[in-house]
Structure formats: structure tokens, C-alpha cells
Image (cartoon, grey):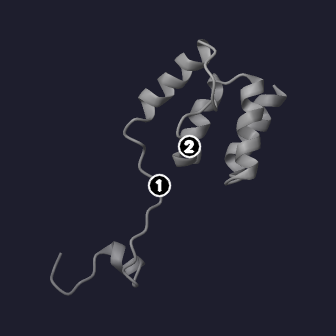
Amino acid sequence: MPIGVPSPAVAANPAGIATCTRAAPLPADRPLAEADRIRRRAGGPGFPISAYDQLTAVQVRKRLPDLTKAELRKVRTREQRGKARKSVLGDIERRLAA
């Protein structure tokens, strides 16, 4: 890119403020999901999804198929009291209705 010519990203964001459209996945996302599955199978205590508050909506939704209806209700309550992401809540409601 020639000197003095802004890159397309800067031209689209003249203030030069860094923006991100997607959150980077947690490096330990897959191992945490697997640990959650194992803990739930063993009847271990705790919230059904580890590191829940750090997960994106996409990451949470990927873990919902593994949950029982009781666990889905726990996640729904926490989501309603927290970030209240429509995509997560909608997916939970669809799974509970099935």
C-alpha cells in the first residue's frame, strides 16, 4: 500500500479505532467442552458450562446440544440475568420445546 493512502480498514473506520466483528475463541474451548461433558456424565456439581461468562454466543450455542432440559433451564436463567443474548435464549427455548 502506498504511503499516505489509508488501508481499506482505516478508510472504513476513519477514527482509527480497532474493531472486531467476532471474538477470538478461547484457546481451551474444546478441552473445556469435553471436560464439561465428562463432569456432567459423572454427576459432578457446578454450572453446566465452564467459563460461561467468557464465551461468545456462538460458543455457548455449540454446547447446548449436550445439555439436559434441566441444565438448559439453568443456562437460560443465567443468560436472562446476564447478557440476555437473543440468539442463545432463542436456541434454548427451541430445545426446551422439542
Q: Give the structural element (helix, strand or loop) at label 2.
A: helix
- Looking at the image, the residue that sits furthest to the top is 42
43 or 94: which is nearer to us? Answer: 43
Identity of the residue drawn at 37% across and 39% down:
27
Rendering quarter of residue 60: top right
Position of residue 29 measured from the top left corner of the image (x, y, whole percent): 44, 35
- Looking at the image, the residue that sits furthest to the left is 3
15 or 35: which is nearer to us? Answer: 35
Identity of the residue drawn at 20% across and 87% down:
4
Image quarter hosting the C terminus: top right
Q: Are marks 2 and 1 in contact (CB under 8 Å)?
A: yes
| Mark 1 burial class by Cα count in 10 Å: few <14, some 14-19, many 20+ | few
Amino acid type for the residue under numbered disc 2: Val
- Looking at the image, the residue that sits furthest to the right is 97
Image quarter hosting the N terminus: bottom left
Position of residue 95 measured from the top left corner of the image (x, y, whole percent): 76, 30
> Is residue 67 found left or right of 24 in the rendered image?
right
Identity of the residue drawn at 59% across and 46% down:
57
| Mark 2 burial class by Cα count in 10 Å: few <14, some 14-19, many 20+ | few
Position of residue 3 measured from the top left corner of the image (x, y, whole percent): 15, 84
User: Is residue 10 depicted above or below 59 in this figure?
Assistant: below
User: Is residue 14 depicted above or below 9 in this figure?
Assistant: below
Rendering quarter of residue 12: bottom left
Q: Any mark on residue 58, and which?
A: 2
> Is residue 79 found left or right of 61 in the rendered image?
right
Mark 2 vs 1, N-terminal side:
1
Task: Tell me the distance, in whole angstroms, between the alpha carbons under discs 2 and 1.
Answer: 10 Å
Say which residue label 1 marks.
22
Q: Give the structural element (helix, strand or loop) at label 1.
A: loop
Q: Any mark on residue 54, and which?
A: none
Amino acid type for the residue under numbered disc 1: Arg
- Looking at the image, the residue that sits furthest to the bottom is 4
